[in-house]
Image (tube, rainbow, N blue to C red):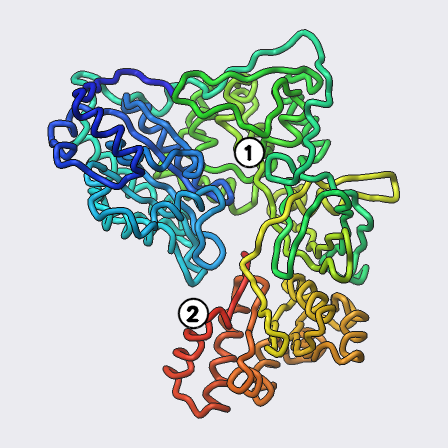
Amino acid sequence: MHLEVVYQRPLKSTRRKTLNSAVQRSMTTCPAELSDSSDKMSSHALLVLFGSQTGSAQDTAERIGRQAQRRHMRVRVEALDSYNVANLISESLVVFVCATTGQGDPPDNMKKFWRFLFRKSLPADSLCRLDCAVLGLGDSSYPKFNFVAKKLHKRLLLLGANMLLPVGLADDQHDLGPNGVSDPWLISFWQKTLSLYPPPAGLAPLREEEKLPPRYVFHFLDEVPDKQTEHLQTPPTPLQPFPARVVFNQRVTHPSHFQDVRHIELDITGSNIQYSAGDVVMMRPCNAAEDVEQFCQLLKLDPERYFTLTPTDSSTAAVPARLPQPCSVRFLVEQFLDISAVPRRSFFEVLATFASNELERDKLLEFSSAQGQDALHSYCNRPRRTALEVLADFPHTTVELSIDYLLDLFPEIQPRSFSIASSLLQHPNRIQILVAVVKYKSMLFKPRKGLCSSWLASLDPSTGDVYVPLWVKKGSLSFPQDPDTPVIMVGPGTGVAPFRSAIQERAAQGKMANVLFFGCRSESKDFYCRSEWEEKVQAGQMILVTAFSRDQEEKIYVQHRVKEQSKLLWDLIAKKNAFFYIAGSAKQMPASVCDALKEVFQKEGGMSENQAQEMLDAMEKAKRFQSETWS
């Protein structure tokens, strides 16, 4: 990133040697002389490290990076797993921005860092030279709210780091979203930081409406290169996904049902992909052709032009590895830039720096400010207005946009994960998924659509070969190896997907102690996999308990069926050490099922409310109670 003015005294040669040897020993020492307080006044470099799963933590980290630039600080922004953690001992000032995934797990791009930092061999004073702060991004509707940020904060303290602030716990459920916590936290952070690392005298921070340099510069080519450079091949990884052919794409809900749910099968022959029950398939969707066309028209871009990218300076991260070099404008807009997402506040911050039209500039600055977050929520978040629609709403500013800023404005399309709904033991060389197609009305004229589900629904194998680039990763659910251990699964709606995989796998292995609680609205409209369940019940491979919430006057949900089956569940859990699983929407269902299960323990086991909670906690600790939920 750009550096305005930096004063940084070189380390004395003796201290440099000490520091280098410390790095080589991977944070196993912290010499006393490194805590020299005079260093605090001479170092003006900030490192922002992020662990991000959906892009929110990365966006916040990049926003902090821009704030540092405006305060004339040299700054680097990196994913935690891209950073050499052994160098942490030589850093002076670091902000960690991290999300929490799954059941309190670190994001994929900080798992290596996580394992290293929690090595028991690291001495208690490893990070005694480090000033740092931790900002967590989470959702308080999940039980392990901001678990990673809290744990990281405690670990850094144990390693001797000087924590500049209490851990920041941003919350999606806040009235103003994560900014409701992160804004005041960042004000405190900069007050504390600038008192320790003051900027050079006489330099005021740059104003918010002043442009910062772009992270990358586009260089357009006169000739069209070989297009093969854009096609990524095996082995399947996030950077090189496997192009799986779509075998079938069938709607499994009744035509009159409001929700379109697809059963999709993908051919993975030749991929060397192996998976087990509970694993997930990852894929990145493409933007719709009409959106790509509109975007190119708004910005007056030729989709067939090719370009290369170069970083603006040495502190900028390398060119994203997923972008081929050279790259076409079409590839960039169709497969990389997330133009159909609801834009974050940072989008308006960058866009405002281009506005010369007074009306548009005032509105963009309002949306960028802390005071304007209510207005931004009403304009953008509530109606789910997309970034592309925002550009169309601000035509004077859009015309002035420089293409060099596209990667500063738009985040990368993030991969989506789907629970695999099949087993290789029953469907060799195949992956099957259940996809609920997201489509709904808001106050805007055009219906809102989910990017990935709409893209998948549009792939029609009857028109010719169509492919989904994908890779597989371990899921959060794991199933017992002992063939005699019963498994109880509660999976309403598309939450049944991982349990279909598990039942197919277990039945093929001769594991017949399977109980499935399935819930949906109507037996005749959205009873997924009905004929398969009936066949497996007939074959003695499972017990099926159903709840059709709208087929009678009084709504019946899976939690009601759990309570009704109290004797069966108590026998399986208390006497046969059964495992219990929940998968599905993270709204009320998981908590309601947990409450129902505790009622079973109280009724059949004669337990108090506290004893029932303790039993559930013990099951969770022993991995006999697992859940996979999503919002």
Camera-nearest residue between 123 and 371: 123
Disc 2 marks which amino acid? Lys
Q: CA distance from mark 1 to mark 2?
A: 36 Å
Q: Are marks 1 and 2 in contact (CB under 8 Å)?
A: no
Q: Specify which label sits upstream in the sequence, 1 or 2.
A: 1
Classed neighbour count for the residue bearing mark 2: other residues with Cα under 10 Å, few (<14), some (14–19), many (≥20): few
Classed neighbour count for the residue bearing mark 1: other residues with Cα under 10 Å, few (<14), some (14–19), many (≥20): some
Residue with the mark numbered 2: 621
**In the rendered image of this protein, does residue 342 appear above or below residue 144?**
above
Quarter in which the C terminus is drawn: bottom right
Q: Quadrant of residue 461?
A: top right
**In the rendered image of this protein, does residue 236 appear above or below residue 225?**
below
- Across and down, in percent, residue 509 comes to 71, 69
Disc 1 marks which amino acid? Glu
Residue 448 appearing in the image: no
Camera-nearest residue between 84 and 393: 84
Label 1 secondary element: loop
Residue 355 located left or right of residue 64: right
Numbered badge on residue 412: 1
